[in-house]
Amino acid sequence: AKFGKRLAPTFDFAVGKWFTPGIGVRVMFDYVQQKGATKNCADSYTHVGNPFINSHGETLYYQKFKYYDIHGDVLFNLTNLLCGYKEDRFFNFIPYVGLGWVDTWNAPRERNPGAILGLMGTFRLSSSLSAYLDVRGTMTDDCIDGEVAQRRQDGDLAVKVGLTYNF
């Protein structure tokens, strides 16, 4: 599907704690609307609409479904670990890993564990507010999209921007 047809809204809410300037944890709730395309409209989440032909000459159907993901992550502030802690630093580079639970809101419902790997950059706006750019990959069971293929997992790649408030 075209790039614009694959964009969808998402919402995150997280609570976390930095135990050292370089290592922290968080618990996060993600609401995700997934859009894409599939060859198999009978066994997957699709919306009514005309099929389309992709650049390889294949007939595809638009796919759309919603899921939520509750996960715990371990965050590593590499900027602080490698360059030393600086309270008023403008930029921090923070890779993270996590485990969670993925649950679709569409029927038939699928509930599966998921693994998360991400890279986040934070930009200090004030002493309590920062903006972030987050690139996150989530892997879960192949059936999460309602379509079982010959793979072991399905993946979701997301690019997110947002704000973080520090208490």
Image (cartoon, rainbow, N blue to C red):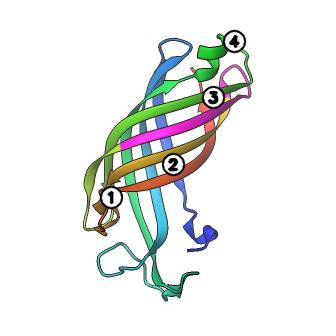
Q: How far is disc 1 from disc 2 in space, using C-alphas?
A: 15 Å
Between disc 1 and disc 2, whose residue precedes? 2
- Camera-side residue of 139 and 69: 139
Between disc 4 and disc 2, whose residue precedes? 2
Q: Which residue is mark 2?
A: 11
- Check if residue 139 falls in the magenta segment: no
Instruction: For mark 3, give the secondary structure.
Output: strand
Instruction: For mark 2, give the secondary structure.
Output: strand
| Magenta stretch, residue numbers | 115-129
Q: Which residue is mark 1?
A: 104
Amino acid carrying label 1: it is Thr
Identified at 56% across, 37% down, the residue is: 119
Magenta residues: mostly which secondary structure? strand
Q: 122 left or right of 103?
A: right
Q: How far is disc 4 from disc 2 in space, using C-alphas?
A: 30 Å
Q: How far is disc 1 from disc 4 in space, using C-alphas?
A: 41 Å
Amino acid carrying label 3: it is Phe
Question: How many numbered marks appear?
Answer: 4
Task: Kindly indicate whether the residue at mark 4 contacts the one at mark 1 (C-beta within 8 angstroms).
Answer: no
Label annotation for residue 40: none
Q: Which residue is mark 3?
A: 93
